[in-house]
Image: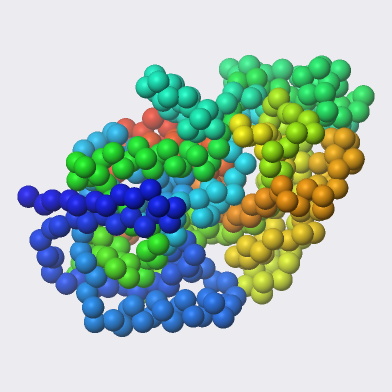
Amino acid sequence: MASLSLSISPNPDHLIDGIFVSPRRQLLRRVAINSSPSGFNFLAKLTSAEKNRRNKVAAVRMSSISPASHSYDVVVVGAGIIGLSIARQLLIGSHLSVAVVDAAVPCSGATGAGQGYIWMVHKVPGSEKWELAMRSRELWEKFAEDIKYQGIDPQEVLGWKKTGSLLVGKTSDEMSVLKEKVDKLSKAGLNAELLSSIDLKEIEPVLVVGEEGGAAFLPNDYQLDARRSVAYIEKENRKYASEGRYGEYYNQPVTGLLRSGTGEVEAVQTPKYSLYSKKAIVISTGCWTGSLMQDLIRDSDIKLNIPIKPRKGHLLVIENFNSFKLNHGLMEVGYIGHQDAILQPNNLDSGAETSSSVSMTATMDTLGNLVLGSSRQFVGFNTEINEEIINKIWERAKEFFPCLRELSLKDLEKNREVRVGLRPYMPDGKPMIGPVPGLSNVFLAAGHEGEGLTLALGTAEMVADMVLGNPSKVDNAPYALHAHSS
């Protein structure tokens, strides 16, 4: 009988190793792949640091030291909100053992840079993602209720709060768009209201949209804190370690995959470990997923297109902001158009700055921090802070909150935090969720762009049902890898 020894430490680096003792397996053919900040390298321009990192990975490949071998039923690659939620769903919904592996630590990618809203106000009833979004929202509500039932405040551990959401417009044309949206949301069964500028002034006094303006209002939308939510999910997952069912392998970049003589992927390779999977390997590595899959199939006859690309975003956070309070989450109607913008042909490997879009989003988290966004850029894997973008976000916010004109962004320097993340963009706007054709035990869950938090629990349930062979609660056909346009 295999045994498990797991050392769990509250240290901030999350240096946690799951030790699963199992009989030695026969040596399998290994497919080497290049590591990136999230475990895999995309086709981006190499910096000197990247070249050094690749050299280290190459050294690992050539090393004669065999990594320690551990075995789980499922290995999840990627410790963002998608990967950790998939692990959680498998742990609570089955008796399977699960390992989570990541090159860094949770919230190092898009998850940690998100604004944390669970909103339906900007979504389209009847669209292919609608059913998944509604199911995921339902699961988030149940998650929060279950936490409350245990005597724990979900606001404290998740940053969970029913703030409601406002999609705001300033012109008569935008109000026509909002009226149509309210009609559709109402017909879809949601409590949606169209607010005039006068109505809006009563519930958000500092927001200014002009006499022609107003908002679509969904009072039952939610806000959460991504980092606290991930920390809580981690904590809950670790409870299964004592049963021999859970292990975390952080700061372990994936350097290769092990395949059997028949070509079946059986293990994930890191510098220290070979993590064998008895049932499934789930790839949830955000915008780095495309490079992994291309490397995986490079020496095979499998033809597969994973068009996930990084879409850079900035958020400006003013900590302990006390100049005014926001009662709801806010988003300008122009955000929808920017979100749906299609990638234009650009040389993403050049590292050159491409055109950007900035639209106003504003939330106030449960800690009293003002969170302003948001930007969208296609600049490859560049994650450097762009002060010009930050200034644009600030200037755009002042158009809706004129009282900010009395404040200088420079004077707020000590209280500001800038979050930069790479959203996993898909050209058709839908995530890829499902088995990888030609690799029967490999599943993919990536490409959620700015909806990772919103869709996380629904995605986790969908993947778990696939792995377990259960009927899907939501139609998964639109997310199958072959169902996407490139």
Q: Is residue 53 left or right of residue 347?
A: left
Query: In the rendering, at what x and y percent does residue 281 appear?
Result: 31, 54
58 versus 23 height, above or below: below
Q: Residue at x 80, y 59 (%)?
A: 388
Q: Nearer the viewer, residue 277 or 146?
A: 146
Q: Which quarter of the picture shows residue 56?
A: bottom left
Q: Nearer the viewer, residue 289 or 184?
A: 289
Q: Which quarter of the picture shows residue 258?
A: bottom left
Query: In the rendering, at what x and y percent does residue 13 appear?
Result: 43, 56
Q: Is residue 270 left or right of residue 35?
A: left
376 versus 47 height, above or below: above
Residue 360 is at least partly visible in this image: yes
Identity of the residue furthest to the right in this view: 211
Image quadrant for the C terminus? Answer: bottom right
Q: Nearer the viewer, residue 260 or 149?
A: 149
Q: Which quarter of the picture shows residue 346?
A: bottom right
Q: Residue at x 71, y 25 (%)?
A: 327
Q: Is residue 109 left or right of residue 241?
A: right
111 versus 345 height, above or below: above
Q: Residue at x 40, y 62 (%)?
A: 251
Q: Residue at x 35, y 37 (%)?
A: 236
439 versus 125 height, above or below: below
Query: In the rendering, at what x and y percent does residue 55 appear?
Result: 44, 82
